[in-house]
């Protein structure tokens, strides 16, 4: 299966799931951050297993530098990878900050924890985006 067909299918189904969940969340009264946490989770529900199937089931696809470089020349694949990186980082950072809020009382330690999560997320975002556009 070509990368374009594979990712088109997974992205389309993921966006349908995101749309359906966004319709339910529209009138929930929850904060935008909370809604985005749920929407990125819905998006990643199929995209992460899709990535694992596509990249790791066939060793040639996920480890052969020529195959990876050729695939990464596609603007569509770069877009998919960019969406994956941004979704994973937002979802993970929001979840980690939520865990910090659950176990730390408001104050300097909570602020330091949030700051550390944000800094780490920004570093990983910079590295991930840089790698996507370097190829």
Image (cartoon, rainbow, N blue to C red):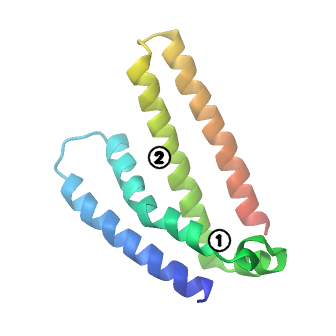
Where residue 102 sits in the image (x, y, percent)?
38, 23
Where residue 43 sits in the image (x, y, percent)?
42, 62
Q: Quick check: 64 above or below 120?
A: below
Q: Residue at x 73, y 50 (%)?
A: 127
Q: Secondary structure at mark 1?
A: helix
Q: Are marks 2 and 1 in contact (CB under 8 Å)?
A: no
Q: Secondary structure at mark 2?
A: helix
- Image quadrant in which you'd find residue 33: top left
Q: Residue at x 64, y 33 (%)?
A: 119
* Residue receiving disc 2: 91
In this rendered view, identify the residue nearer to me: 31 or 52.
52
Q: Quadrant of the C terminus?
A: bottom right
How far apart are the alpha carbons under marks 2 and 1?
A: 21 Å
- Image quadrant in which you'd find residue 60: bottom right
Describe residue 109's horizontal placement relative to residue 17 as left or right: right
In this rendered view, identify the residue nearer to me: 32 or 81.
81
């Amino acid at each position: 299966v070509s990368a374009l067909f594979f990712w088109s299918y997974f992205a389309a189904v993921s966006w349908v799931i995101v749309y359906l969940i966004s319709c339910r969340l529209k009138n929930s009264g929850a904060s935008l951050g909370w809604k985005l946490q749920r929407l990125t989770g819905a998006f990643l529900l199929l995209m992460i297993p899709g990535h694992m199937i596509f990249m790791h089931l066939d060793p040639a696809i996920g480890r052969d530098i020529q195959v990876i470089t050729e695939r990464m020349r596609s603007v569509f694949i770069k877009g998919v990878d960019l969406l994956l990186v941004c979704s994973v980082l937002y979802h993970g950072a929001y979840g980690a900050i939520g865990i910090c809020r659950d176990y730390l009382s408001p104050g300097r330690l909570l602020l330091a924890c949030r700051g550390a999560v944000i800094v780490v997320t920004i570093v990983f975002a910079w590295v991930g985006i840089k790698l996507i556009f370097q190829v």
